[in-house]
C-alpha cells in the first residue's frame, strides 16, 4: 500500500518556513538510512550515469554470480539530492537476489512505487537509477553503450547536456506531453528555458509519430500510426536497409534481431524480437540503433519500436 506523502518544511535565512517537496516516510527512511551506500571492490558490473557538472551523478556496482547470473550484492555512490539517494538505495534493495534477466525488467516506476511515491519534480531521480542499472547490465554483458557526441543539432538542453534522442525516448516511453513533464523526467529545460521551443518540437514529433493510438505511460515501445514509407528504390530507403543489414549481426549474436517496418525522412520504425524485447533492453537497443542510424546517415533521426495493434477476438 502506498504510504501517505508527508510535507517537509525548511527555514530560509530569515527563519521563515519554506515549503519543500512532499516525501513519503519510505523516502525519508532511505535518505537518512541508505542501504548499500558503498563501492563494491569485487564488482564485475559497473554503471555510471549523469555528471556532477549537471547536478546529479550515480555509480552502481554489482557483484553477479557468473554461473547463476544472480546479483549477489549491489552498491551505489551518488552525488545528488535526497530523492537521488533514496532512489539509488531502493534500487539496490529491489535487485539484490534477482537474476540479471529479472533485474533488467525493472522500471523507474517500480522504484517510485517501492518508495511510496516521489514528487513529480523528482521523477528524474528514479529514471537515473534505472539508467544506471541498464548501464551496469550492459557492462556485465560486454555491451558498449555509445554516448552521444552532442554534435550541433543533436544537443537540445545545453545546461544539463540532454540530447534530442534522450528526450524523444523519454517522451515516447513515459507518455510525456508537456515541457514540465520533460523537465521532471530528464531535467532538460529546467534552467535557462532557451530550449523549451526545441523540446516542444520533439514532443510534437513523438505525438505525430504515434498518432491517436499513443502508447500509455511506462511502455517501452509505441503503437505507430501508419506513416508514408519511402519506396524501395528511394536512395534513402536503400541506405537505411544497408545500415540495418550491417547492424543485425550484432543483435543476433546476443540472441536478438531487428527488422524494418517502414521508414520516412524523419522516422524509422523497426520491429525488435528475441533478447531485444526485454523492458530495459528495448530502450537500450533503440538508443543504440538511433545512434548508429544517425551517424551513418549524417543527421539525427528517431528510431521507434513498432507494436502491432491487437487483433479483436471474434465472438
Image (cartoon, rainbow, N blue to C red):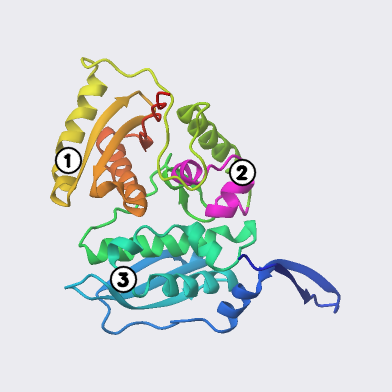
Determine the residue positioned at 37% across, 82% down.
39
Image spot of residue 269 (x, y percent):
33, 31
Q: Secondary structure at mark 2?
A: helix
Q: Which residues are magenta?
A: 167-191
The residue where tag 1 is placed is 248
On screen, 296 above or below 77? above
Measure the alpha-carbon separation of dots 1 and 3: 26 Å
Image spot of residue 211 (x, y percent):
49, 26
Q: N-terminal of the two: label 2 or label 1?
A: 2
The residue where tag 3 is placed is 46
The residue where tag 2 is placed is 179
Q: Looking at this rendering, what residue extends furthest in the front direction?
A: 315
Measure the alpha-carbon separation of dots 3 and 2: 32 Å
Determine the residue positioned at 56% across, 78% down.
30
Asked if labels 1 and 2 touch by Cβ distance under 8 angstroms, the answer is no
Determine the residue positioned at 53% across, 26% down.
212
Determine the residue positioned at 39% across, 64% down.
132
Amino acid at each position: 500500500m502506498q504510504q501517505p506523502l508527508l510535507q517537509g518544511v525548511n527555514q530560509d535565512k530569515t527563519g521563515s518556513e519554506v515549503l519543500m517537496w512532499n516525501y513519503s516516510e519510505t523516502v525519508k527512511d532511505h535518505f537518512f538510512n541508505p542501504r548499500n551506500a558503498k563501492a563494491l571492490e569485487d564488482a564485475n558490473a559497473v554503471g555510471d550515469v549523469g555528471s556532477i557538472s549537471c547536478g546529479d551523478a550515480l555509480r552502481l556496482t554489482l557483484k553477479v554470480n557468473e554461473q547463476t547470473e544472480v546479483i549477489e550484492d549491489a552498491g551505489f555512490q551518488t552525488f545528488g539530492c535526497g530523492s537521488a539517494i533514496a532512489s539509488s538505495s531502493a534500487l539496490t534493495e529491489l535487485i539484490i537476489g534477482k537474476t540479471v534477466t529479472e533485474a533488467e525488467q525493472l522500471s523507474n516506476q517500480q522504484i517510485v512505487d517501492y518508495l511510496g511515491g516521489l514528487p513529480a519534480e523528482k521523477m528524474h531521480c528514479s529514471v537515473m537509477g534505472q539508467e544506471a542499472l541498464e548501464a551496469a547490465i550492459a557492462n556485465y554483458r560486454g555491451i558498449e553503450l555509445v554516448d552521444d557526441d552532442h554534435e550541433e543539432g543533436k544537443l537540445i538542453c545545453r545546461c544539463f547536456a540532454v540530447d534530442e534522442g534522450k528526450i524523444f525516448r523519454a517522451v515516447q516511453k513515459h507518455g510525456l506531453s508537456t515541457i514540465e513533464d520533460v523537465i521532471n523526467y530528464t531535467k532538460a529545460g529546467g534552467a535557462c528555458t532557451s530550449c523549451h521551443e526545441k523540446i516542444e518540437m520533439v514532443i510534437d514529433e513523438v505525438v505525430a509519430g504515434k498518432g491517436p493510438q499513443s502508447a500509455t505511460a511506462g511502455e517501452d515501445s509505441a503503437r505507430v500510426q501508419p506513416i508514408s514509407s519511402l519506396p524501395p528504390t528511394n536512395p534513402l530507403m536503400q541506405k537505411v536497409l544497408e545500415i540495418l543489414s550491417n547492424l543485425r549481426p550484432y543483435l543476433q549474436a546476443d540472441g536478438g534481431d531487428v527488422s524494418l517496418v517502414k521508414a520516412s525522412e524523419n522516422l524509422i520504425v523497426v520491429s525488435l524480437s528475441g533478447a531485444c524485447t526485454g523492458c530495459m533492453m528495448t530502450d537500450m537497443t533503440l538508443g543504440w540503433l538511433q545512434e548508429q542510424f544517425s551517424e551513418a546517415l549524417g543527421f539525427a533521426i528517431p528510431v521507434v519500436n513498432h507494436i502491432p495493434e491487437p487483433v479483436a477476438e471474434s465472438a
